[in-house]
Image: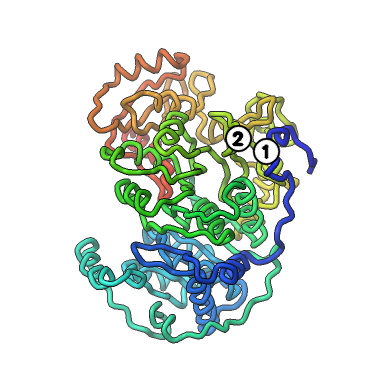
Amino acid sequence: MELVKKWHEHYPSEIPVTIKYAEKPLYAFLAESAEQFKEKKALHFMGKELTYDDLYTQAKQLAFYLQSIGLKKGDRVGIMLPNCPQAVISYFGIMMAGGIVVQTNPLYTERELEYQLKDSGTTILICLDILVPRVTNVKGKTNLKHVVVTGIKDYLPFPKNLIYPFIQKREYNMVIKVEQSDETHVWQLILDNTPADYLEAEIDPKEDLALIQYTGGTTGFPKGVMLTHYNLVSNVQMCQAWLYKTKGKQQIVLGVIPFFHVYGMTTVMNLAILQGSKIILMPKFNAEDVLKTITKQKPTLFPGAPTIYIGLLNHPNLNKYDLSSIEACISGSAPLPSEIQDQFEKITGGKLVEGYGLTETSPVTHANFIYTDRVNGSIGVPWPNTDAKIFKMDATDEEAATGEIGEIAVKGPQVMKGYWNNPEETENVLRDGWLFTGDLGYMNEEGYFFIVDRKKDMIIAGGYNIYPREVEEVLYEHGAIQEAVIVGIPDAYRGETVKAFIVLKTGYTVDESDLNAYCRKHLAAYKVPRIYEFRNELPKTAIGKILRRQLIDETQEIST
């Protein structure tokens, strides 16, 4: 890799072009922070707080227990939890024991859960009590031998821990009672009766897997991305370098974005543990709860996704809350509309910039500069030790010219080892050290990168290439629109035609003719949506990414 790139000219002096990454297991950061910040608060969860010493001790206890029930180095252990103390403890405890973490979305259906457990060969699963019936129904079809069960109440302060079972019964219409057995293990009993002197596994950071992280699966079966300790260590150290003003300062990080998604895992959990910061854990996104939490807990860092920021900005009581503690936010998982960026910065006084990455890159490869000049509409520039190129579409060995749209490819220490049990797909995307992302974009003369869309999402109508992101940007600038997504649907004459799904802001009314006239002012005629569908909400992943493929499938089902 060339050491000097066009984009390095823009790096502020505080960000190094090259970093010497720690060649050690990811969990070493927790051990170091526990030694340095023993009594400092590590986690805040609904009024309950754990120190770094508490967190490290409980992770060691879990590691010991997992080894005592047969966990060997390289065994896969699933975590099926929302953001809660158990999720952080489990993540580090599994790695300490030599296991490989498999993050599992708590919202998965039985079909999705069965697929992931079977594909990964998971033998132990840590889950919430309310998920036990779902797990029990699929257990016999998988390699699952042990289930460790915990509950939200396990980390609630008194008297919330006594009240919570009644809330659970009302919300989920179930009362879960879990008994300890050879195959079922009760979290609280583990912590009450287990020593912390686990046997540390021998880890080769560059070769040994820390994590199998499944892709979103919005276009077919999810693939298990194999990430080594070194992949995760390098990416979180890049993140620390990018946020150079936070190093050595007392930071409070808001953990709304799920840790079972690699973006939340790296930019919230791993970064906070590396720096000895306090994490405010929130098990799900609710706009009012988040606004109250920011006002009360005063977080300084708030990694998120566009739909999270949109949800806050459109809350009817936004002006009642104080968001001025927020200093920096990196938005990921989906394109950040510039209108949302500007509004959020005005409200908070902090910086909100767009970043870019993939599950396959641990996840971040690019971001705008937070504290110096940025380029609106751009995903920014590659991070330290990260190279990026635009390759001509369908010509993998030929680089595109400056300003020419092609497929983005990246190379760096954060790039995955490959797909789990899927050598063919690995070969398709990893070529000569380059990861071909499937995203279309271009690089300008200054070395800034721009995404135009997913290769699979590009619409070809009447021979013209239409990029949904461009049309969505225009719609987001309309004062009445809260959310918008563009899809291509089959058209007998044009091949494909443009359809817009719209969610309006509360209290606003516009119709198809209004939006058609608006779009014609701002877009070439062939890009203007031909069909508009108004909805109360749009389907999303747990991290807030709009499920474009689901909307396309729904439209096609209706038309047939």
In the picture shown, does residue 43 fall above or below 182? above
Q: Is residue 207 visible?
A: no
- Specify the quadrant of the image occupied by residue 139: bottom left
Residue 534 image position (x, y, % from top left): 29, 30
Estimate how packed mark 1 is, as few (under 14), some (14 to 19) or many (20 or more) residues with alpha carbons within 10 Å: some
Left/right placement of residue 17 relative to residue 28 reads: right
**Which residue is more in the foreground, 98 or 336?**
336
Q: Are marks 2 and 1 in contact (CB under 8 Å)?
A: yes
Residue 40 image position (x, y, % from top left): 50, 66
Q: Total number of numbered labels?
A: 2
Where the N terminus falls, by quadrant? top right
Residue for badge 2: 372
Residue 380 image position (x, y, % from top left): 60, 35
**N-terminal-most mark, 2 or 1:** 1
- Specify the quadrant of the image occupied by residue 107: bottom left
Where the C terminus falls, by quadrant? top left
**Which residue is more in the foreground, 478 or 440?**
478
Residue for badge 1: 12
